């Protein structure tokens, strides 16, 4: 474990199935999780442990469930390996192949807003005048984000609405039924 980080408190947390936990599961320090020089500002990742889920070694990050506040853990379900609420409130969050969370966990309503925003935004580069790279640069500019901060998986519902509004305003030919509303 990295020096200065407390051991994770796992009391009251349902463990992975016995065959899913390695005998060498160990806490992973923050620097190892985020990468050298990475910042944890606005990141849900504070600590992590190595686990094996469905025969795959992953780094499980400690995430609070956005629905009930309980701990989320990596599990395999019909969608693949993702973070699921341990008590089972139906909270869920996607994961990269290495176990790193995809963006910031969100409630069901924010997940719907993100999905709608992605559907709208993706039309700008799939059907519109911009390449994907140009579309992300446009998004960062119109939403006044820093370079590389245009990740819809990090947006709240309000930012998703701003993105959709900007798409409709700046690319009305792609959204004829919504333009002018």
Image (spheres, rainbow, N blue to C red):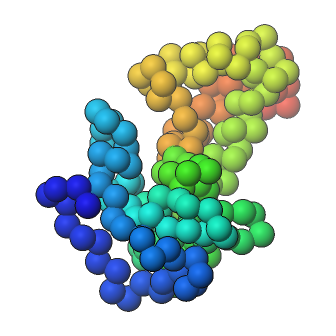
The picture places residue 35, in percent across and down from the top left corner, at: 37, 39
Extreme-front residue of the structure: 23
Location of the N terminus by quadrant is: bottom left
Residue at 50% over, 43% down: 154
Location of the C terminus by quadrant is: top right
Residue at 29% over, 72% down: 8
The picture places residue 145, in percent across and down from the top left corner, at: 44, 24
Choose top left, top right, bottom left or bottom right for residue 130: top right
Numbered-mark total: 0
Choose top left, top right, bottom left or bottom right for residue 11: bottom left
Residue at 66% over, 70% down: 54
The picture places residue 170, in percent across and down from the top left corner, at: 68, 16
Left/right placement of residue 134 relative to residue 127 reads left
Extreme-left residue of the structure: 4
Nearer to us in this view, 70 or 157: 70
**Image height check: is 167 above or below 8?**
above
Query: Can residue 88 be seen at all in this image of the molecule?
Result: no
**Image height check: is 94 above or below 34?**
below
Nearer to us in this view, 115 or 98: 98
Left/right placement of residue 55 relative to residue 130 reads left
Left/right placement of residue 14 relative to residue 117 reads left
Nearer to us in this view, 56 or 11: 56
The picture places residue 97, in percent across and down from the top left corner, at: 62, 51
């Amino acid at each position: 474990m990295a020096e200065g980080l407390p051991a994770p408190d796992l009391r009251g947390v349902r463990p992975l199935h016995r065959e899913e936990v390695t005998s060498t599961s160990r806490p992973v320090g923050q620097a190892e999780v985020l990468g050298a020089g990475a910042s944890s500002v606005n990141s849900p990742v504070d600590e992590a442990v190595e686990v094996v889920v469905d025969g795959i070694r992953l780094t499980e990050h400690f995430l609070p469930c956005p629905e009930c506040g309980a701990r989320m853990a990596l599990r395999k379900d019909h969608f693949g390996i993702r973070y699921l609420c341990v008590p089972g409130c139906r909270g869920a969050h996607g994961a990269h192949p290495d176990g790193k969370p995809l963006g910031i966990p969100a409630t069901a309503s924010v997940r719907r807003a993100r999905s709608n925003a992605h559907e709208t935004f993706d039309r700008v580069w799939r059907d519109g005048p911009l390449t994907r790279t140009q579309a992300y640069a446009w998004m960062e500019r119109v939403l006044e984000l820093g370079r590389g901060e245009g990740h819809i998986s990090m947006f709240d519902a309000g930012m998703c609405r701003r993105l959709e509004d900007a798409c409709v305003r700046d690319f009305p030919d792609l959204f004829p039924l919504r333009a002018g509303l």
